[in-house]
Amino acid sequence: MKKTLSSFAGLLVIVGTVAGINFWSLGAPLSDAMKSDSRNAGVEASVHYENYISPSVLVFDLKNVSPSNSPADVFRVFLQFSSRVKDKSFERVQLAHSGTVKFQIKGDYFKILGQEFGQQNPIYTIRTFPENVYRPDGGQAFGTWTGGVLGVLGKQMEDFNKFHQEWYIKDMVASASK
């Protein structure tokens, strides 16, 4: 009995340590980002290392989005968070919705997003983001457009909207209709 309690106590210490590391290194910066801008109200997300123990992979898990929020609001939260952790390095960042990984981006690109936040033109960031998005299997999710400026801008914005549809909007609409 004492050995079982000792093993259980040891397990609790390990779980508590893992949860604490995830909270202080990722959860607290996300909380700060969420509170820093009143327009973030209605967007719910969590962050953690892959399987809570692999610091080379960040999981940004979108939990809920209020009907009053737009994809731009969700993306702003993501960018604000990236700026809070811009000094951290990741191999990749997984974009999940309610625990299911939908997309990923390279860690170097995530770092650039964080470093450029507040300096780079947000429209440029929005329209070029999809070409840096990959499926969970590593295949590129969206293409890179070439051609006339207006045509390219239109296709990039279509991809940005499609990205949000596939990331969380379709799931939320399906859940709401049940």
Image (cartoon, grey):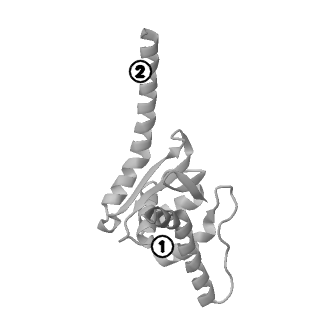
Q: In which quarter of the image is the N terminus?
A: top left
Q: Residues within 10 Å of mark 2 (few under 14, many from 20)?
A: few
Direction from residue 22 to residue 50 in the image, left or right = right
Disc ID at residue 120 = 1
The x, y position of residue 83, in whole percent, is 44, 60
The x, y position of residue 3, in whole percent, is 46, 11
The x, y position of residue 164, in whole percent, is 52, 69
Residue 146 quadrant: bottom right
Disc ID at residue 34 = none
Of residues 119 and 40, the one nearer the viewer is: 40
Q: What element carries label 2?
A: helix
Of residues 65 and 78, the one nearer the viewer is: 65
Q: Does residue 16 lie above or below 100 as drawn?
A: above
Q: Does label 2 or label 1 sit earlier along the sequence?
A: 2
Q: How crowded is mark 1: few (under 14 residues within 10 Å), some or many (20 or more)?
A: few
Direction from residue 83 to residue 135 in the image, left or right = right
**Residue 109 appears in the figure:** yes
Q: Does residue 14 lie above or below 113 as drawn?
A: above
The x, y position of residue 132, in whole percent, is 61, 66
